[in-house]
Image (cartoon, rainbow, N blue to C red):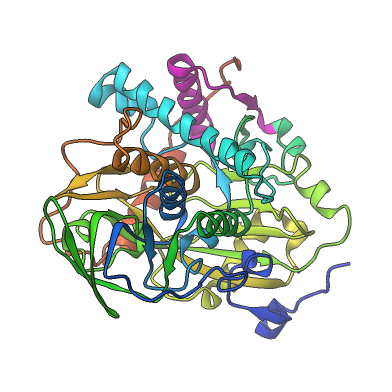
Amino acid sequence: MLRTARRSDPAELLVPDFREEPYWWLAAPPGQGGDTADHDLPRQVEVAIIGGGITGMVAALDLARAGADVVVLDAQGIGEGAARRSAGFLGRTLKRSVEWLARKGGHPYAASVYRELDTALKGVAALVEAEAIDCHHTICGRFVAANSPAHFRALIDDLEATHREVGFPYQVVERHEQHREIASDLYCGGAVIPDLGSIHPGLYHQGLVRRARAAGVRLLPFTAVQSIEPGEGQKRIATARGSFHARQVVIATNGYTSRHLSWHVRRVIPFRGFIVVTEILPPGLIERLLPRRRTYLDTRMNIDFIRPAPDSNRILFGGLTGTASDTAAPLAAALRSRLAAILPDLKDVRLARAWTGLCAGTFDFMPHIGRQDGIHFALGYNFAGIPIGTHFGRLVARRILGREDAESVFETARFPTAPFYGGSPWFVPLAMRCFDWHDRRIAARQPATSARAQP
């Protein structure tokens, strides 16, 4: 049974061995298993990849196996960034819907965006299988819970439009049916997207690192880049440990993009995500609360999200995205309260871990891949980090190798920024409040009388 927690006593919120670090580090701690093997700085290299996350590792692996001399630099230890801090959701969703994209760029453009998202999603499964990475990859489906009748109507309309455009499946879950998906009365129905999945992001990234090292990739952790000489031909890279030259350079830093990369940092908006994980729960409780063991999120712009841990009897919960806090511990009580509001049976649960990490959005809510002043970049994943990060890593490698199958709908002539923006996301908390206001307006609309039939 869960231990009863006195809400007035903060000590009862946390287990005795609580730690403020990602749960995934229990199985895949950074710096172990050779993940951060330190090499001397080279004098010259063929390809230098800035950022040791998923994009960097996938690109490095493909390039090294094609015979390229590759180094990966990171300002932190390899594995300390977002790659081993995410929730491990695998989807093909952006904040821009198919209908919105069709209005702005036409139906062929909208379809091509979502087809490439689907390619990215399937690419994770293909890579995991090809590399035999044991990382709890599964196609569990996703339940999207509607926060109001109007949100429910908008959700079904959006999924139906996507189905018409690109054929993606979904299943309507009316409010009276939602307990078959989640033991909560907070929502107004929702929908299941059956072919989405989940993964253990720590083990996935660790597997990529180990295969990259085996292919000959050199890792340079704690090597912050201070400047890159732009242009074609050899580029001089200055770091905190000295300088070297590279023929090709890739920027794959996303939410951890340094201000020294002045063009890139002006185009990504870093923001913090926050996740907690429960203590070990009694046998059978997860099956009662989350009967299908899917991934779960809601329909608000500033979402709450839930998933069962893939390797223990715990539940992970995330929310309060963009809150102005550099650490997760101060938000632990608020996060547990939000979790208990959704799943009241967890009102007395204690927390074992809490952590935060940097994600990155963009001013147009779209990921971007391209080349600027002779430097490749892949940035701005907008909540689609693992699939898009994997996909962009493969695309960057193909481009450097001169292959023809490297086109992307996410390569556009314009990667927007904003006047006077220099990389400091002071406006993120305000933007999140605007999103909350937007969701309240949606919820206040006239409720729907019925849902459309599922395809």
Where residue 44 appears, as percent x and y from the top left, is: 26, 65
Residue at x 21% of width, y 35% of height: 412
Residue 55 forms part of the magenta stretch: no
The image quarter containing residue 279 is bottom right
Compared to 125, does 19 lie above or below? below
Residue 145 seen: no
Residue at x 46% of width, y 40% of height: 443
Where residue 354 appears, as percent x and y from the top left, is: 59, 71
Residue 149 forms part of the magenta stretch: yes
Magenta highlight range: 148-175
The image quarter containing residue 226 is bottom left
The image quarter containing residue 207 is bottom right
Q: Nearer the viewer, residue 13 or 43?
A: 43
Residue 108 seen: yes
Compared to 189, does 132 lie above or below? below
Q: Is residue 258 left or right of residue 20?
A: left
Residue at x 27% of width, y 50% of height: 377
Compared to 453, does 126 lie above or below? below
Q: Is residue 414 left or right of residue 396?
A: left
Q: Is residue 235 left or right of residue 310?
A: left
What is the magenta segment's predominant secondary structure?
helix
Q: Is residue 232 left or right of residue 287?
A: left
Compared to 40, does 389 lie above or below? above
Where residue 140 appears, as percent x and y from the top left, is: 69, 38
Where residue 218 appears, as percent x and y from the top left, is: 43, 64
